[in-house]
Image: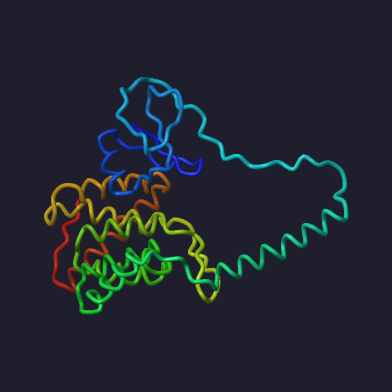
Amino acid sequence: MIKVARAGVIIGEYPPSDIPALIRAKVILPTDDYWAPGMSNWAKALTYQETRMAQTSPPPLPKIEVPLNQSEGPVPAWLMASGGVGLIIFGIMAFYLIIKEPVIDPKEKEEFIACKAEADAGNLRSKMELGWLHAKGRGVRLNSEEAERLLLDAAKTGNPEVFLKLSEFYRFRPPFETSRTGIRFNGYGDYRRSYAYARLAWSNKGYVEGVFSLMGQVMMHGAEEHMSAAEVSEGKKLAAAIRDRIYEEKGYHVPLID
């Protein structure tokens, strides 16, 4: 199994055959670190190549360098004063980052406007794509709340691609984000919802064969690593409830593997 870490924390273990698809789908980012048995050290996913397996243990994860304060004894008054000034400057910068408009690529802005027009006309696939643009801040300011609303609406079709995007959204959405009204705390990864939607994508073999089912299985197992047995059970129940709701509201049957 290939271990993958992000910012010094292991986020999952995957079969070597799944890694290229995960990189293409951006579940594994180019800046993530990976290690395979037989490697002497961790490497960036950008440089990933299949490695022959061997029985060995991984080296320590790459450390994030943190500058140390090497001063000892009481803090001088001038240093405390300069620290207060620094805090004020930090506050001003934080306020500026909240109220300022993000720098948006003109091409991405055009794509966002075109996608929004199609979504407003009722195209559910465009709603999915529009939700993903809000989730990633492409062509528009990042907005997790709007992204969730659009993705959930698009999920009513039972499309496994939307289930995958919702699974990734709930697992990796940023815990904090800025808006014109302030800083919003989104909470940390919602593994139960991520697991449920990944399970639905995995179970959709009757709708689309291949990569969606595989990616759903990978995302499901990745979420499982952070869940207790009780939480996994809750995730299964949630997946079944979502499936039944889609069937009742839209008359579209989503088979679920037990």
At a point 38% along the width and 59% down the height, the residue shown is 170
The residue most toward the bottom is: 121
The residue most toward the left is: 206
Residue 8 position in % (x across, y down):
51, 40
Q: Toward which corner of the image does residue 234 lie, by quadrant?
A: bottom left
Q: Quadrant of the N terminus?
A: top left
Q: Is residue 23 above or below residue 164?
A: above
The residue most toward the front is: 106
Q: Toward which corner of the image does residue 68 lie, by quadrant?
A: top right
Residue 175 position in % (x across, y down):
49, 60
Q: Is residue 68 left or right of residue 224?
A: right
Q: Is residue 43 above or below residue 176?
A: above
Q: Is residue 67 left or right of residue 152?
A: right
The residue most toward the top is: 55
Q: Toward which corner of the image does residue 104 lie, by quadrant?
A: bottom left
At a point 25% along the width and 61% down the height, the residue shown is 162
At a point 76% along the width and 62% down the height, the residue shown is 85
Judge by depth and name the residue closer to the eye, 45 or 250. Answer: 45
Residue 228 position in % (x across, y down):
42, 48
Judge by depth and name the residue closer to the eye, 101 or 63. Answer: 101
Residue 177 position in % (x across, y down):
50, 65
Q: Is residue 131 left or right of residue 102?
A: left
Q: Colour scheme used in the picture?
A: rainbow
